[in-house]
Amino acid sequence: MRIDIVTIFPEYFGALDVSLLGRAREDGILDVNVHDLRAFTHDRHRTVDDKPYGGGAGMVMKPEPWGEALDAVLEVDAPVVDVLTVDAPPAEPVEGGPIVIFPSPAGEVFTQAMARELSGAEHLVFGCGRYEGIDQRVFEYAGSRASVRLVSLGDYVLNGGEVAVMAMIEAIGRLIPGVIGNPESLVEESHEDGLLEYPSYTKPAEWRGLAVPPVLMGGNHGAIAAWRHAAQLERTRRVRPDLLPPA
Ligand code: 6GU
């Protein structure tokens, strides 16, 4: 998978060099490219924002640097130009083509199901906004060249999209085949079956007066599976009843 990130804070993404995702990049499974939005400005001050039309607090990100940045990162998907069709109208975004994601508290909520869907894409582009947002025409323009999604991590506000994009890339990246050594570790985790995961224990059997549930040490695999499923249900009912089907 190819990932392009456009941001005014490329340093945020240094952490992608480490751990599982760093290994996936070394192995050529993930091709991550971080782009400084200011590289697509042409003025001495490398200006990326300006006052909002209509007034109001804060600054809005200007469309021109975004347009150039999107053109540059989407170039890799452009079909080879056929001399017979150069005058044809620009192609509509194609199914299976690049997906441009703008992190935004105004977007649809990111879920494990969305992470799984996006893990099948060939090319993801993340556009990190700061300030009060990005000029609305950038989303329209991006939509003329690719599939566009506004995606939120949840109902709270971050200063910008960078931290949200780190979270999304980690959630998506670990689902790409080959990124995680043991794919079985992916099936029994929170949210994969609509429930929170069961609690885990390892040695010692007793620690600071706290015991491991005896059923887990008894070797009865049916009983262990039943205990774990009941623990998942209890935990989900207690902390995330919204995940359960209506009774
Ligand atoms: Cl994706 N962006 C920002 N700026 N704030 C958020 C968010 C995203 N998700 C939750 N809060």
Image (cartoon, rainbow, N blue to C red):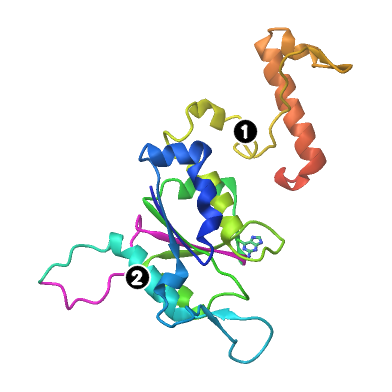
Q: Is residue 195 above or below residue 229?
A: below
In the figure, is residue 1 to the left or right of 13? Answer: left
Location of residue 35 (image quadrant): bottom left
Closer mark to the observer between disc 2 and disc 1? 2
Label 2 with label 1: CB-CB less than 8 Å: no
Which span is picked out in magenta? 84-105
Disc 2 target residue: 71
Q: Residue at (67%, 63%) from the top-left corner? A: 158
Location of residue 124 (image quadrant): bottom left
Rounded to the nearest whole Å, what is the CA distance between mark 2 and mark 1? 38 Å
Disc 1 target residue: 189
Q: Residue at (60%, 87%) from the top-left corner? A: 52
Task: Estimate the x, y position of residue 56 in percent, counting from the top left.
Answer: 68, 87
In the figure, is residue 73 to the left or right of 159? Answer: left
The quarter of the picture showing ligand 1: bottom right
Task: Check the picture and name the quadrant holding the C terminus.
Answer: top right
